[in-house]
Image (spheres, coloured by chain):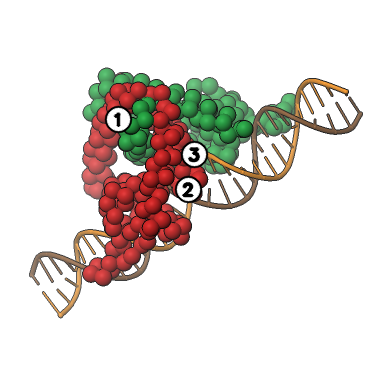
Chain colours: A red, B green, C brown, D orange
Amino acid sequence: MNVSDQSLANQLCFALYRASRLYIKLYQQALQPFALTYPQYLVLRMLWEADHQPLHTLGTQLDFGSNTLTPLLRRMEQRGWIQRRPVATDRRQLIIHLTDQGRQAQVPVGQAIQQLTAQQQLSPTEGQLALLENQAIIADLQRLLAHQSIIKEK
Amino acid sequence: MNVSDQSLANQLCFALYRASRLYIKLYQQALQPFALTYPQYLVLRMLWEADHQPLHTLGTQLDFGSNTLTPLLRRMEQRGWIQRRPVATDRRQLIIHLTDQGRQAQVPVGQAIQQLTAQQQLSPTEGQLALLENQAIIADLQRLLAHQSIIKEK
DNA sequence: CGCCGTTTAATTGCACACAATTTAGTTCAC
DNA sequence: GTGAACTAAATTGTGTGCAATTAAACGGCG
């Protein structure tokens, strides 16, 4: 980005921040009847895609550290969505399994989300474009942050 | 958005969530020497633009409620960035003023941000496009959420 | 004047996020 | 084999975000 464009970066960062919070607020409306939060829904989606994943893998996919996942997964276990089971061969690891309740929630939760997101007036074309743009931003930021942490090592 | 595109909404929401967190992480690197957080920086920016604003007005511009701003502003006052002063004519209100420290931070903080954001490889054109797309999403979500809260009133 | 609805700030309680540290377990070089 | 380097999860502490509630004060109306 050009040096003269601090203002653009500021606007972009703030727009992403607001858009993210608003989108999550919309999702929370759909998730509230299930007593799920948005990060918890993300974990469920990962597990619906592929069950029996280690905590670490979930963290990699969602960009969460163990300090975020540990209490989040504990709450999800308490509420019966998942089970946290240790591994015999490596006692450091923890494998996350869906419970029956967790598996069965897939359809109704999906429908609740559908019902709200279908009301968006944003065209699929524009949505696609925004997705691509934002993925480019993510890639750029990841590169930059990785680079920064190398500098920090010194 | 089309009914068949739940997956697009899911991807978009997640991309916004990740991009926002990454961008904020980048900003925090610049803000860390000043012991400022990103939301605190946003408040400072509003006040650099126009000083002596009521808490409520700041909340409107940043999309924060008083339950977020109250503790945030208290911390900022403790650290000497701002002052919270009651109004003689209306004791419910609270006007936020910059301190000298808060005013003088504008240039060095801006430079620190500049130094990091200048390293983005994202082209200004793409940044502009992403900004427009995301602003369209914000507008769409605000419309939808406002509509939902009307339904909720019933 | 006095009451009531409204507005606004503060409070409470819960759930993230994340930096930094600690604890426990594994692996690899020698 | 064993000790250092590494890895994974948990812990600690701070700072948001936000729903829901409470408290305070204004303002209009009878």
Q: Is residue A125 left or right of residue A118?
A: left
The answer to whether residue B23 of the structure is visible from this angle is: no
Q: Are marks 2 and 3 on the same chain?
A: yes
In the rendered view, would you say B72 is above or below B128?
Answer: below
Q: Chain of mark 2?
A: A
Residue D9 is situated, as x and y percent measured from the top left of the image, at 33, 61
In the rendered view, would you say A132 is above or below B25?
Answer: above
Q: Please state which of residues D5 and B21 is positioned toward the viewer in this rendering.
A: B21
Q: Chain of mark 3?
A: A
Label 3 residue SS: helix
- Position of the N terminus of chain A, as image quadrant, is top left
In the rendered view, would you say A134 is above or below B50?
Answer: below
Residue in the image at 32% along x and 49% along y: A48
Whole-angstrom CA distance, mark 3 to mark 1, is: 22 Å
In the rendered view, would you say D22 is above or below D25?
Answer: below
Q: Give, as a three-letter code, the residue at label 2.
A: Phe
Q: Which mark is residue A131?
A: 1
Q: Please state which of residues C29 and B82 is positioned toward the viewer in this rendering.
A: C29
Whole-angstrom CA distance, mark 2 to mark 3, is: 10 Å
Q: Nearer the viewer, mark 1 or mark 2?
A: 2
Residue in the image at 43% along x and 24% along y: B140
User: What residue does disc 3 label?
Assistant: A29
User: What residue does disc 2 label?
Assistant: A34
Residue A135 is situated, as x and y percent measured from the top left of the image, at 27, 33
Q: Give, as a three-letter code, the residue at label 3.
A: Gln
